[in-house]
Amino acid sequence: MIGKKKGNDVKAFLGAGAEFEGKLVLSGSVRIDGNFKGEITGTGTLVIGECATVQADISIDNLLVFGDIQGSVATKNRVEISSSGRLSGAVATPVLIVEEGAVLDGKCRMKKVDEESEL
């Protein structure tokens, strides 16, 4: 099951209806349920909620997608797209999980952690 792991305590939260534009650097788990535009980097897990709309280039350890992302994504560990999730853009990750009903539209490269990624 997507997002049902122990130890995923959310350290920051951008709620539904909130809008943010800029650069987000994170450590730990962060959840976005509002609108975000810009760049997201860091370590940990990024959760994109069902109501979220994100237009960003993302570089993170883990990504859980329940909402809508447009942009390039690079993860060190995994990308999981739920049945309500939509990801449009280039994806580079060693593990990709796409549930039935999810939308993935773009270029995908599955790579080992020690490989360089060029999207």
Image: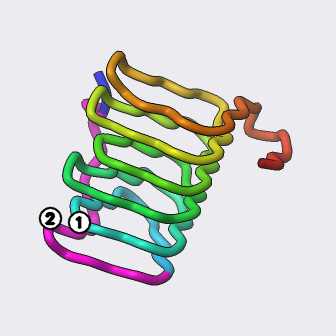
The boundaries of the magenta stretch are 3-22
Question: Residue 1: where, in percent of width, then height?
Answer: 29, 21
Q: State whether residue 59 is above or below residue 93.
A: below
Q: Nearer the viewer, residue 64 or 76?
A: 64
| Residue at the extreme top of the image, as rendered | 100
- Looking at the image, which residue is at 39% across and 61% down? 54
Q: Nearer the viewer, residue 101 or 23?
A: 101
Q: State whether residue 24 is above or below residue 34.
A: below
Q: Tell which circle, 1 or 2, labels the residue nearer the N-terminal end.
A: 2
Q: Are marks 1 and 2 in contact (CB under 8 Å)?
A: yes
Residue topped by disc 1: 34
Residue topped by disc 2: 16
> In 3D space, how far apart are the residues under numbered discs 1 and 2 (Cα atoms)?
4 Å
Question: Residue 107: where, in percent of width, then height?
Answer: 68, 37
Question: Residue 21: where, in percent of width, then height?
Answer: 40, 82
- The label number, if any, that marks residue 42 in the structure image: none
- Looking at the image, which residue is at 22% across and 46% down? 50
Q: Secondary structure at mark 1?
A: loop
The residue under label 2 is which amino acid type? Answer: Ala
Mark 2 neighbour class, 10 Å CA radius: few under 14, some 14 to 19, many 20 or more: some
Asked whether residue 4 is drawn in magenta, I would say yes
The residue under label 1 is which amino acid type? Answer: Gly
Q: Secondary structure at mark 2?
A: loop
Q: Is residue 63 left or right of residue 95?
A: left
Q: Is residue 19 left or right of residue 88?
A: left
Q: Is residue 93 left or right of residue 10?
A: right
Q: Nearer the viewer, residue 88 or 12?
A: 88
Q: State whether residue 74 is above or below residue 53.
A: above
